[in-house]
Amino acid sequence: MIATVTMNPAVDYTVSLEEPLMKATVNRTDHERITAGGKGVNVSLILQQLDVPTTVYGYLSGTTGAMIAEQLQRTQIPTDWIEVPNQMNRINLKIRENNTVTELNGRGVSVTEQDTELLLQKLRRCGDGDYIVLAGSIPAGAPATHYADVMAALEDTGVRFAVDAAGAPLREALRCKPFVIKPNLPELCALFDSEIDTWWDALPYGKKLQEMGAENVLLSLGGDGALLFTAENRVWHLSAPHGEVKNAVGAGDSMLGGFLAAVVQGKPLTEALRMGVAAGSATAFSEWIANRSRMDNLLRTLPEPTELV
């Protein structure tokens, strides 16, 4: 089973504009979509499509929290929310224009030590053979060690962790030796305060992440596919398939979901890389999170990954 933890669930309000966004005036939308959002939620949506048991955990509050709960209930994915009083889950505005997306993400809810302890109690149901995905931003006001603290508290359960975070929370989480992390290229640049222009330039940084504690590193590269650094000191690259990008939001989450689905099904890591690239690309080529048939169709077109030496 794969538990996904979204510390900051959101209502994603996605709008499309026919004309470029103009400042200090009224802009009219051409198309709108309201969905339950958050990296962990997106990972679980992919896992459900791939027939992998998953449960969504996170904090809900206020009317927006009720909207998130209702939308997840429709998917029939099991959830185990923690109710936080007197606040409101964030609304993330995503503006699509000219094949680009501008995002304005809310701050999210604050949680207490008691809320965190309740989350840990729920996650202790996981054990050997299970995975916990810690994805997205940490709760408002939480210390940068928040993910690391959760991982350390659950160290004795035997679960394996996948972390999709950025900045200081990712750096701190590396100390707890996660099974896999999934940064993208901009996050890699920010983490090391370096300009990394090409995926080839990223190679030494992927290995640095392993030296810092990651067992495996899945580096998403957008249109260039992904790099996979494995615990066996092997590095693989797989290019993304060609297609019309309709929605880059959630593509990285889908890649992680596809990768983990293959892992828990006992497939080699090279096949997990193929499934990850197929899932990430399928979402990028869809209006929202991809369905199973689109992922399967892309998977059939992908070659074997290339090992780099």
Image (tube, rainbow, N blue to C red):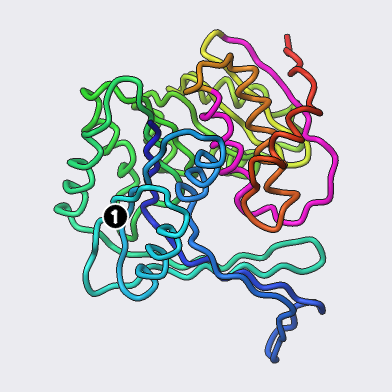
Name the one closer to the observer, 20 or 289.
Answer: 289
Q: Residue at x 24, y 31 (%)?
A: 154
Left or right: 158 as drawn, with respect to 194: left
**Circle 1 residues within 10 Å: few <14, some 14–19, many ≥20:** some
For mark 1, give the secondary structure: strand
Q: Quadrant of residue 274?
A: top right
Q: Which residues are magenta?
A: 233-262
Q: Residue at x 41, y 39 (%)?
A: 54
Identify the image quadrant of the N terminus.
top left
Three-letter amino acid code at the position of disc 1: Trp
Name the one closer to the observer, 240 or 220.
Answer: 240
- On whether residue 187 falls in the magenta region, the answer is no
Q: In the displayed structure, would residue 282 be above or below residue 96?
A: above
Left or right: 11 as drawn, with respect to 202: left
Q: In the displayed structure, would residue 151 be above or below residue 116?
A: above
Identify the image quadrant of the C terminus.
top right
Q: Residue at x 51, y 29 (%)?
A: 260
Q: Which residue is mark 1?
A: 81
In the image, residue 165 lies at what x, y percent? Answer: 47, 43
In the image, residue 298 lies at what x, y percent? Answer: 76, 35
Q: Quadrant of residue 297?
A: top right
In the image, residue 97 lies at what x, y percent? Answer: 77, 69
Q: Residue furthest left?
A: 114
- On whether residue 256 falls in the magenta region, the answer is yes
In the image, residue 277 lies at what x, y percent? Answer: 68, 33
Q: Quadrant of residue 31?
A: bottom right
Left or right: 245 as drawn, with respect to 226: right
Q: Residue furthest bottom?
A: 25
